[in-house]
Structures are given as structure tokens and as C-alpha cells.
Image: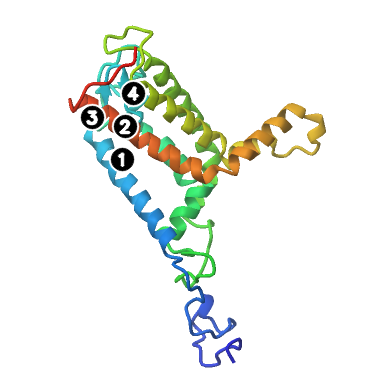
């Protein structure tokens, strides 16, 4: 019978092919192109990883006044390019000889890697755990997030706090973007709009985080006694429903902002100004 068990299954086999599972010869019964979504997700994430790795280790063309790449902000080493009133805070001094981007990228990278949506994205796309709904994963055992390195997912809330600080710095960079190349205030270029859109998307993505929702409304037994937190919890809940889209939009906006600064700094073109 198709729904019976296979008495000839080796006792050492576990998972969906174990002796206690239904003996269905097909790997799955889905007839649609279920692999398109995990494949597209893997391609998108891989492209961003390749691009961001190149830019992080390039250590060049990340500042074109008044714009600084979000990959290099704040700049925490002595080997940063001088930025007038910019996020130059040489906390690491002169001993740091690598790209200063490596210092700061660990914070937004850790936040995204431990994000609930990104876990789903790369678990399915790269680890096939599982690759799609109703498609068995190829692993014989499942340990979840109880062992290293996945147990590190439990520090997501702390990366959320760090991501808020980074978002504040990038908002500061956006304010500085309302200057021209001579640092005079009251000007706006195409880069200003790109930085403004990036800052908004980063804030929306950060605030739509599940940890943010829990920080605001978690452990409250009586919402009626905390009307302000309840209202904020409801607003964050609405953003949380769009967390996946905001994750992708903000990921693209960060790359676009960095690419725009790179093109300006490398002399590909001049920043178009509106006033």
C-alpha cells in the first residue's frame, strides 16, 4: 500500500525515509515549479554577498563629498578618508590596517543573518532545510538551532539594538547629504534622494523586526494598562506583516546607495543637482 510502511527499510535510515514514515517512493508530490522561489532567493542573496564582499575589501571609492557609502559608515579607524563633519570616529586607532568597512559591517550583517525572514530564505535556498513546503529535506537528522553555529541565532535581539544605532548613523549621513560638494547647506542632488530612500527603507525594515515587536509589546499582561505601547505594538505589527518585502527593498537600497557613491568617487559621472 502507498500509505503503509516499508518493512525492508534499513533501520539506520532516519528522516522522511525512516522505517516509521509512509513508504512513498516519490520524493514529493508537487507538480508545480516549486524550485523557482528558492533558486531566485539564492541567486539574489549570492549576488549581494559577492558585491558587498568586493566593496568591503576594496577600501577605496567610498566617499564623494558629501556622500559616504553605507558600507563604510561609521568609519572607525585612522585609515578612513577624511569626511568633513562626517562619521569619522577613529575608535580603533591606527593599528587597524584592513578596510574599515569590515569593522562596522558585522553589525548589520549579524542583524540580517539572524533575522527571522532571512533564516527562512537561506535555510531553504542554501541548506534545503526544507527547500519548499511539502518537499522533504535531504538531511537525515534535524537539530534546529540548538547547536553551533545556528545557536547563535538567539542573539538576534542584541543585533537589533546594534542595527538601530547603525540606522541612526545612516540617518545622520542622510542629513549631511543635503550639502553640496563644497559642504554648503541647502542643496539636494540625486544622491540625496537615494540616501533618503535608503534611510527610510532601513528604518522600516529594522522597526518591522520581530524582536522590535516583542520589545515594544512583549510580556505585557494587560494592554489596557499600557495604551501607548499597545498602539506602537499595533503599528509595528502592521509593518511586521511586510517584513519580507522590506528586507529585500532595504537590501537593494543599501547596495544602490553604495554603488552610487562608488560611481561618483571613481569619476564615472557627477552628481546631478536639483538646487
The residue under the point 71% across, 31% down is 231
Above or below for 19 versus 237 = below
Give the residue at mark 3: 263
The residue under the point 43% across, 24% down is 196
Q: Is residue 272 left or right of residue 247?
A: left
Give the residue at mark 4: 191
Q: Helix or strand or loop: what does disc 4 sit on?
A: helix
Look at the image and tell me whether residue 122 can be seen.
Answer: yes
Give the residue at mark 1: 52
| Mark 3 and mark 2: Cα distance apart in space | 9 Å
- Determine whether label 1 and label 2 are within 8 Å by CB: yes
Asked whether 118 or 153 is in front, the reply is: 118
Label disc, if present, on residue 165 of the rendered structure: none
Front of the two marks 1 and 3: 3
**Quadrant holding the C terminus:** top left
Q: Is residue 15 left or right of residue 51?
A: right
Q: Please rate how many residues cluster around mark 1, counting C-alpha atoms within 10 Å: few if below 14, some from 14 to 19, many from 20.
A: some
| Mark 4 and mark 3: Cα distance apart in space | 11 Å
Label disc, if present, on residue 258 of the rendered structure: 2
Asked whether 178 or 143 is in front, the reply is: 178
Question: Which numbered disc flags the more N-terminal residue, 2 or 4?
Answer: 4
Question: Which numbered disc flags the more N-terminal residue, 4 or 3?
Answer: 4
Q: Position of residue 161 (x, y in %)?
A: 53, 32
| Mark 1 and mark 2: Cα distance apart in space | 9 Å
Q: Position of residue 205 (x, y in %)?
A: 51, 37
Front of the two marks 1 and 2: 2
Amino acid at each position: 500500500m502507498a500509505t503503509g510502511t516499508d518493512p525492508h527499510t534499513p533501520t539506520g535510515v532516519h528522516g522522511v525515509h525512516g522505517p516509521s514514515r509512509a513508504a512513498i517512493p516519490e520524493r514529493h508530490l508537487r507538480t508545480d515549479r516549486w524550485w523557482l522561489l528558492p533558486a531566485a532567493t539564492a541567486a539574489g542573496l549570492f549576488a549581494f554577498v559577492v558585491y558587498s564582499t568586493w566593496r568591503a575589501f576594496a577600501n577605496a571609492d567610498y566617499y564623494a563629498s558629501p556622500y559616504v557609502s553605507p558600507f563604510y559608515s561609521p568609519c572607525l579607524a585612522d585609515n578612513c578618508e577624511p569626511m568633513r563633519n562626517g562619521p569619522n570616529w577613529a575608535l580603533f586607532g591606527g593599528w587597524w590596517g584592513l578596510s574599515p568597512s569590515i569593522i562596522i559591517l558585522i553589525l548589520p550583517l549579524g542583524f540580517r543573518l539572524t533575522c527571522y525572514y532571512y533564516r527562512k530564505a537561506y535555510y531553504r535556498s542554501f541548506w534545503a532545510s526544507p527547500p519548499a513546503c511539502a518537499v522533504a529535506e535531504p538531511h537525515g537528522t534535524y537539530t534546529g538551532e540548538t547547536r553551533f553555529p545556528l545557536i547563535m541565532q538567539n542573539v538576534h535581539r542584541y543585533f537589533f539594538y546594534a542595527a538601530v544605532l547603525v540606522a541612526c548613523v545612516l540617518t545622520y549621513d542622510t542629513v549631511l547629504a543635503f550639502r553640496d560638494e563644497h559642504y554648503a547647506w541647502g542643496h539636494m542632488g540625486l544622491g540625496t534622494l537615494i540616501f533618503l530612500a535608503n534611510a527610510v527603507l532601513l528604518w522600516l525594515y529594522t522597526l518591522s523586526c520581530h524582536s522590535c515587536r516583542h520589545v515594544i509589546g512583549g510580556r505585557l499582561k494587560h494592554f489596557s494598562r499600557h495604551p501607548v505601547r499597545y498602539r506602537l505594538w499595533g503599528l509595528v505589527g502592521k509593518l511586521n506583516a511586510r517584513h519580507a518585502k522590506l528586507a529585500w527593498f532595504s537590501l537593494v537600497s543599501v547596495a544602490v546607495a553604495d554603488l552610487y557613491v562608488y560611481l561618483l568617487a571613481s569619476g564615472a559621472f557627477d552628481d546631478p543637482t536639483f538646487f
